[in-house]
Image (tube, helix red, strand yellow):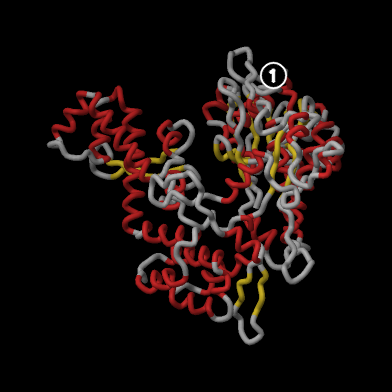
Amino acid sequence: MAESGSFRGGGVGDYKTFRQTSRDRLFHEMLQSTKVKESQSTWKVLILDKFTVKIMSYCIKMSEITNKGISLVEELFKRREPMISMDAIYFIQPSKENIIMFLSDMSGRCPLYKNAYIYFTSPIPKELVAYIMNDSSVIPRIGALIEMNMEYFAIDSQGFVTDHEMALGDLYGESTENSRNYSLCLNTMATRIATVFASMRELPFVRYQAAKSSSNSTEVSARELIPNKLAAEVWNIISKYKTTMPDFPQKETCDLLIVDRSIDVIAPIIHEWTYDAMCHDLLNMDGNKYNYEVPSKSGSTAEKKEALLEDHDPIWLELRHTHIADASERLHEKMTSFMSKNKAAQLQLIAKDGGELSTCDLRKMVQALPQYSEQIEILSLHVEIAGKINTLIRDLGLIEIGQLEQGLVFGNVGTKEVINFLRTNQDVSAENKLRLLMIYASVYPEKFEGDKGAKLMQLAKLTTNDMNAVYNLNYLGGQVTKKASGGNFSLRFETQKKKLSARKEREGEDETWQLSRFYPLLEELVEKLSKGELQKIEYPYVNEPTPTKQEGLNSGAPSQKCLNQASRSAKSRRTPTWAKQRVSDDGNSRYSVANSTPLV
């Protein structure tokens, strides 16, 4: 589902990542805003709900919050001690439950805090504003009541999620279109996507994946209309920013393309061989957190540690999108280079009788070479991670599985090879067999008709629940039918969907590393979008560019002339405003405070 995204933009010298933009907003529009600076309280309390705790944790470290005058961070629904001499900053979602809790904090004769500065993640309904204003004891204690319009998780330097883990079930499950969860999920998702553009101060042309009617009927399923519905809701919210948000663009400045998982069901299933993907696939990481053990200084018990694989780690930034074989090779080169340039490190190697240094040896080197401790710590961490991944690849037989997966996708292998693999590799994990069958079903759906699916399940020794995951691919674009005589499902994808499941070898690209030829179809779509080659009939506009009389005869993409006039062409696009630095008094880049919408 279109609940995540990533960004590019900016030129050399004025480039800012999406996470930096989000971080700047939290600092300069909330923690250090003009309103907050008017407070007489030197130190303040920051109150967060469960959702905003995550927003903050993805962007800001606790030490940075303290440096901005926040003495304490507390959760809204936990018991808190009164601090009547201090002001509080509330960063919360505009829900009735949160408003009730806020009023209980600040109303009456004995409020918890002296004054309150309230920042909402998204637009607050008028009835909730009225609910607050009805409490006369609270109004004098409100220093600010502002819509921040920031309700997403900046999980990466260039990516975000809207936190809808159950979106597939809520939107694509059986008979869900009339449910409360369906409408709530769409509305909330649209609101959160819209706040991304509030942060970037970008007004997009909104495009979406058009519904494709069934080959047997002119009817369009409710599931196929989801991208259309979501796109319409997103545009409805974003377009209001033009009048409610100061300094928001009045003309379109970028593109937003909304698609659903049916465009490529293979990408999240197939084994991806980059360092980043392998870490998350094989190491049971908690988000970007990697847990590991090191020998304690006493040597008695192992010491548990954790590392965040994020932007502050230069080796992670360099290697995360490289093939695992390339990453391993580069790490070996880095280690060799380090050893050759440091005499003390060479002595350590000589003491090892010229043998290979283990991760434990590297940690001993850290103690021997304190001036290089940080460098060696990071390097040894990645040597350990890469070594563990390569061991798992070998132990799990992933190279053979990966070759079969990519062979299916590119049409090099078929049913015979899949059957033979399942027969001769009974010890393969249930997860990997399931992933293989899901790819097989995406490319050859007819092989699961009738009792064929049950036979494959028996051969793979998968459970009924496992096979339901295969059959549930139908909900992403096919038709689910049941045999009258039994309970087996028939997997029938439309012809057009089946064609989308295949990959064509890309011309002019050499496969430097084994198993590196797979690519997600979204990559093709984005390339076509940037070149103005995305067909309007397949990906219509919600807010369509206005063509000239001559150009109106063309039903394809908008003309380059039209795009240039709006300053949004792929070749001459301006530097996105969210990527531009604004220098504050202390010399640091900052974001305009005018981005928030004050309510009082």
Residue most toward the bottom? 485
Question: Is 505 situated above or below 317?
Answer: below
> What count of labels does the image hold?
1
| Quarter of the figure with residue 446 | bottom right
| Quarter of the figure with residue 370 | top left
Residue 50 seen in this snapshot: no
Q: Secondary structure at mark 1?
A: helix
- Report crowding for label 1: few under 14, some 14 to 19, many 20 or more residues within 10 A (C-alpha): few
Tell whether 151 sits left or right of 466.
right
Tell whether 205 sits left or right of 407.
right
Out of 543 and 319, give the one closest to the viewer.
Answer: 543
Percent from the top left, x then y, of residue 183? 76, 55
Out of 179 and 353, give the one closest to the viewer.
Answer: 353
Percent from the top left, x then y, of residue 324? 39, 45
Q: Amino acid at mark 1?
A: Lys
* Residue found 66% across the figure and 42% down from its top: 529
Percent from the top left, x then y, of residue 319? 42, 38
Out of 202 and 126, give the one closest to the viewer.
Answer: 202
* Residue found 65% across the figure and 31% down from its top: 571
* Residue found 77% across the figure and 29% down from its top: 565
Residue most toward the top? 585
Quadrant of the snapshot with the C terminus: top right
Question: Is 33 situated above or below 154?
Answer: above
Residue 46 seen in this snapshot: yes
User: Label 1, on which residue?
Assistant: 37
Percent from the top left, x then y, of residue 311? 49, 33
Tell whether 221 sits left or right of 268.
right
